[in-house]
Amino acid sequence: MAPREATTGPDRTGPHRTAPDSTALAGALRSAVRGEVAFDAAARALTTMDASNYRRVPLGVVAPRDAEDIAAALAVCRAHGVPVVPRGGGTSIAGQATGTGVVLDLTRHLRSVVELDPGSRTAVVQPGVVLDELRAAAAPHGLTFGPDPSTHSRCTIGGMIGNNSCGSHSVAWGTTADNVHALTVARYGGDTLRLEPGATGPAGVPELVAAHLAPLRTGFPELPRRISGYALDALLPERGPDPARAFCGSEGTLGVVTEATVRLVEAPAVRALAVLGYADESAAAEAAPGLLPYHPLTVEGMAADLVREPAGLPRGAAWLFVETGGATPAEARAHAERIARAASAEAVDTAVVTDPAGQRALWRIREDASGTATRMPDGSEAWPGWEDCAVPPARLGPYLRDFRALLAEHGLHGTPYGHFGDGCVHVRIDFDLLSGDGVARFRRFSEELASLVVAHGGSLSGEHGDGQARAELLPKMYGDELVGLFARFKDLWDPDGGMNPGILARPARLDENLRFDVLPRGPVDVAFGYPHDGGDFSAAVRRCVGVAKCRTKEAAGPAVMCPSFRATGEEAHSTRGRARLLHEMLAGPAGGVITDGWRSTEVRDALDLCLSCKGCRSDCPVGVDMATYKAEFLHHHYRHRLRPASHYALGRLPRWLRLAAPFAGALNALARVRPLAALAKRLAGIAPERGIPVLARETFTRWLNRRWGRGTFILSNDQVATVWPDTFTEYLSPEVGRAAVKVVEAATGRRVLAPGPGVCCGLTYVSTGQLDRARKVMRRTLDRLAGTHDSPVIVLEPSCAATLRTDLPELLPDDPRAAELAASVHTLAEYLEKYAPDWRPPRLDRPVTGQTHCHQHAVLGDGPDRRLRERAGLTGELTGGCCGLAGNFGFERGHWDVSVACAQDALLPAVREAPPGAEVLADGFSCRTQLAQLGGVRGRHLAEVLAEGLDPGAPAPDAC
């Protein structure tokens, strides 16, 4: 087929045929491919957005199993006149991973490292391989893949090729294009090409290049981070030509990579980090080029307005992170110290960090910037759009001054950071993309900033590609002649215009398809207060910008997010996927995807496997709180409707346990009768595989009352400590409460009491979305605590402590008593650290294993617990992740497999691999139950271990 006449107008954005018949298209795809074909509302909603400001609604999603499936899908789509967009991790920031036709999800099946040859330092990979998986495969050979964007734990090699991604080590190892040797590519229609040095690519390309040598030789600026447009200069005869290099950065507009041969580089055995503090951002930027002759691995920069906590940084208002490598620790450190000395004349302060944990902590500040930068210090929203332009490194200082001045001129704010050694700057800007005036200012600023970048000899994109965000402005950088050649090059590859139309060649306008257009402009009636989002549920959902840190396959260190995604690998079960579905739910019928609002079954089903672990609240760089959003959704979804049986049984657990307590012995005996237990579980919506927990024969408060008598004590606050009788401690594990009493008495000399009967944090009502009942329970609790809300309270169950500290004030934002009680909540370790700072706990001197409770990690923090364990001689680290039981979640019918998978992710392996004699710590009742039922292991609360150490060989306090 002859290519069409090239134009630069906006009307040539894809195949021009009648509207496709989705049913016929889906049927044809199912007949042609072996992978999954999904045209349902949920699948479409999950792929409407990437990590950009843009949203395009696809017709359906195909997950090809192999290269033949890719070719077959492309042939069917061409036959039906439907455009195609290849999608990897969906972390693109310029909109190029969204599309209106068929999305090819290359992450589900095409994830293999086909071959790795240490001798030639090459690897053959499929496009859906996650970068960290390739690096892990190369690591045993002392090799790595050089480019490493901050999304390295979830971005794919195919996506990196599409965007020509770079990362922090590009000063040493270059861009993705510098590290690609050969590609196998499928074109629209299904035919394939092999791209390698010396090959020609599609017919007509050599002739196009030969006819336009002059503009191709002079029209591309020479700078290390020139990513914008098509790399046609890679096809010049004096450069090879290299069609694989020219394909890199084409953003899915030319074809689909089915296999890639990439180059690997030698990974330094040891690394050190020189952190250099400067007076301001421009000083850091001007110093960066002078460090390049020392051959560092990175020269990364950021300013103080990005750093929420100093976290061990040296003095200064801006910093350079300069990484060095070596064969030995001494060599790496000496290299870093040389750089620090060389920088000392301009730097305010310097530090050299050799401890791997310290380096990881500092790098996390930098890597999380793509998320943390989406919130300004005052909490207002900031957005991509000018995320990664680049200028010659020597021009970076002046450029940043001009950039800051342009921001001020438009009344905008941003927090620049990025790859200062390569002159590349990332920034999120507080554009108002919700109003017509704000969008108009976004366009004016974009046009003026493009001119500023070009004036400094730069590239509109320095890492993430042009996409829809910047492609419209490419004529400012390249001129009309070169942009016209881009369109002709695109037509030679894709004569039908079916590959990712609207991107790069004949682009859509930068202010079209904004993802905010479909969101409600007025407030949404909700139950929670959403204090960090101005009470606006839409703003809370908008927090998710798609950086997809929740899509990692392994929990790093103490991290928790996202256990359900690690268990299933499904986008719908990631924090991002659920946020996308909520976004489409809010869009309503106008969005055309999810049209039944709070009654949506698509959202309900995705949230069903959310464990409400709250891990995203702390681990998501932008603080998405899916546990709260889930409770909000369930509240509306089941309002005035019949709920699942488990909501009545487990969601109202405090009530049932209070009624059952007098009959604990008889009920325990009945629970041991298998037919009766099976019937009870069936009626209660409990998984048949689960064991029913044993009820305590004596509740914690009854024991405490017998211990002290039921009389009223007239005591001052400095004579009394209060332990909260949470439902689990009260009815299921009172031994934890008794142990805590012993520890607190020994540490403080104070008498331990508990609030009166009937107090409850409302946890189980919140987790099942029974928010009206939760508020009623919370108000009753506040009434019963009249006059004592500001007294310190020790809460032993982490989930209950987290509920009191966060859910209580967010559900009762207008009741000052809620905030007072929330502020009074202490974990046992927090209380001891604050009120018994000189107490010396018993020296236990043994290793520990287990898991930090997910709510403790996410809401409460575990610093005091770590310090208490250290003082007691309890050595070793607790793992991250979630136990998988997570309150009612693991007990509910249909959740068994995911619950087990979550436990097998981190907790059970940690226990199996623990040294002999290790103490298994588990402060949460759910964690202890999961350990017992799945691992046959008894986990104990820290209070129990300490109490035992106070009097070795003696039982915990009982009804003495």
Image (cartoon, rainbow, N blue to C red):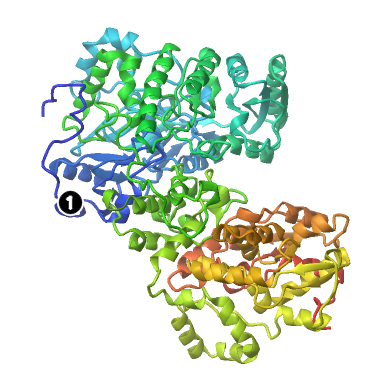
| Number of marks in picture | 1
In percent of the image, x 54 and y 91: which residue is there?
673
Task: Indicate the quadrant containing the C terminus: top left, top right, bottom left or bottom right.
Answer: bottom right
Residue 646 percent across, percent down from the top left: 47, 75
Viewer-proximal residue among 395 and 81: 395
Residue 58 position by quadrant: top left
Q: Residues within 10 Å of mark 1 (few under 14, many from 20)?
A: some
Q: Amino acid at mark 1?
A: Ser
Q: Is residue 913 visible?
A: no
Please tell me whether mark 1 sits on a helix, a strand or a loop. Answer: helix
Query: On screen, 705 above or below 363?
Result: below
Left/right of residue 715 with respect to residue 61 in the rendered view: right
Task: Indicate the quadrant containing the N terminus: top left, top right, bottom left or bottom right.
Answer: top left
In this figure, which residue is indicated by the disc labeled 1? 22
Residue 334 percent across, percent down from the top left: 72, 24
Residue 53 position by quadrant: top left
Query: On screen, 538 above or below 202?
Result: below
Residue 171 percent across, percent down from the top left: 53, 22
Residue 759 percent across, percent down from the top left: 65, 73
Query: On screen, 794 above or below 696?
Result: above
